[in-house]
Amino acid sequence: MPDVLMPRLSDTMEEGVLSRWLKKEGDAVHRGDVLAEIETDKATMELEAYDEGVLERLLVAEGATVPIGKPIAVIDDGTPTTSAAAPKPAQAAAPSASSVPAAAPNPAQAAAPSASGVPAAATTRIPTSPLARRIARDHGIDLATIAGTGPAGRIVRADVEAAVAAAEGRPASAPASRPASRPGEPTALTPPTASADDEEVPLTTVRRITARRLTESATAPHFYLVSVIDAERLLAFRAEVNDRLTAAGTRISVTDLLVRACAVTLRAHPQVNSSWGGDKILRHVRIHVGIAVALDDGLIVPVVRDVDRKSLGEIATETHALADRARAGRLTPDEFTGGTFTISNLGMYGIDHFTALINSPEAAILAVGAASQEPVVRDGQIVSRATIKLTLSIDHRVLDGATAAAFLRDLKDTLEVPLRIVV
């Protein structure tokens, strides 16, 4: 009986959340059937079956966080339980359930199997904050014995601390006992204490991975270059193109023009189209531009591939479709990995200027502000012109100042003469 394993669905994925089971115990399973929805660090994706048979047992509950490679279900394909099945890609069949321990349940979200063999939490999940789960685990408190006082009966920190106090025979307001630190053991930072008016918001997978990736990015030695472009001709060009494309139902955004302009400029400056490889620099032949998209619970960067080989209309169609799928959590792994350069545009929010953290391991990211009317000197006269501030963040391990400055200078020239974008 092969195990269904938590697959690796993206290059940065280390664990997945079993968001929803689409099959139940006793259901017939065929190759290609969708067994469950898995929430990764980037999107919610479907888990397909690689084996045929009957879904004999669910090993984890909905909402449980499971490391990649750990069993989450067992399919009875008719083979004896003492034999081992052949490996399968991504969901490789591991040794039989009798010889392999079941996946370790998430401390807060999985429970012991019920009499029917289904984890009790698969049907009744205890809503709990991450901090409450940690405190309960540290003090050996069973969450099932606690009545939650948070929204919709959610168990929060105060509920667990009250249970800990009761177990230790002290008033709830008295400080909890803490195990003594061992000699040489580092002292852990104490998390901030929430007041009665605070709401604890649990981290989603996307938010947790976003935080980890940005922390890693912040360790790169950044430097920044700023340039102000005269955007009058660029905005007029966009308006003219959109007038001509109205019948086709295509709309060109400023971001689309920037994607194409960056592709043209990267082609002339291949050093910028590079990544940090630890002990080497990877210079990419193909140009794949990522576009930062804000989600309710984090950030994701869909990638337009081979963008220098695509027309402005093709870029517009693809970027809009990618953004829609990103917000719906339906991107596939190849749609958010493999970027070689990233653009982050906050101009639509009225932000004039900002700096962005590099999307590691890429060498650079372009931050784009809003178009605004500014006084400038033209032919000895002060006139009002639309301008846009561009800020290039660069990994100094990969690029030096003069190389990055030459790229930004040529990008400015291209944007100020927008016909260069389409040739």
Image (cartoon, grey):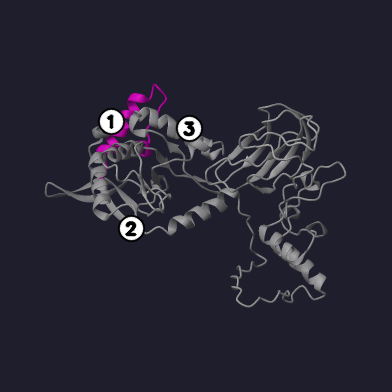
Q: Main secondary structure of the magenta part?
A: helix
Q: Say if mark 2 contacts mark 3, CB within 8 Å.
A: no
Coordinates of residue 306 in the picture (x, y in percent): 38, 33
Q: Please give left or right for residue 345 compared with residue 190 in the image.
A: left
Q: Residues within 10 Å of mark 2 (few under 14, many from 20)?
A: some
Q: Residues within 10 Å of mark 1 (few under 14, many from 20)?
A: few
The type of residue carrying mark 1 is Val
The image quadrant that residue 129 belongs to is: bottom right
**Which quadrant is the C terminus positioned in?**
top left
Q: Which image quarter holds the N terminus?
A: top right
Tell us which disc is closer to us: 2 or 3: 2
Mark 3, secondary structure of its residue: helix
Residue placed under numbered mark 1 in the picture: 422
User: Secondary structure beneath disc 2?
Assistant: strand
Q: Over which residues does the magenta segment extend?
A: 230-256
Inspect the magenta stretch and tell me whether residue 250 lies in it: yes
> Where 256 sits versus 104, above or below?
above
Tell me which amino acid carries mark 2.
Answer: Phe
Count of residue discs: 3
Question: Could you say where residue 419 lies in the image, as x and y percent from the top left?
Answer: 24, 32
Give how far across and how far down residue 299 sits, in percent.
50, 47
Rendered position, 60 above or below 161? above
Residue designated by label 2: 223
Residue 365 in view of the camera: no
Residue kind at label 3, given as amino acid type: Ala
- Residue nearest the observer in this picture, 193 or 17: 17
Q: Which residue is mark 3?
A: 321
Magenta-colored stretch includes residue 302: no
Spatial CA span between label 2 and label 3? 33 Å
Q: Residue at x 68, y 28 (%)?
A: 33
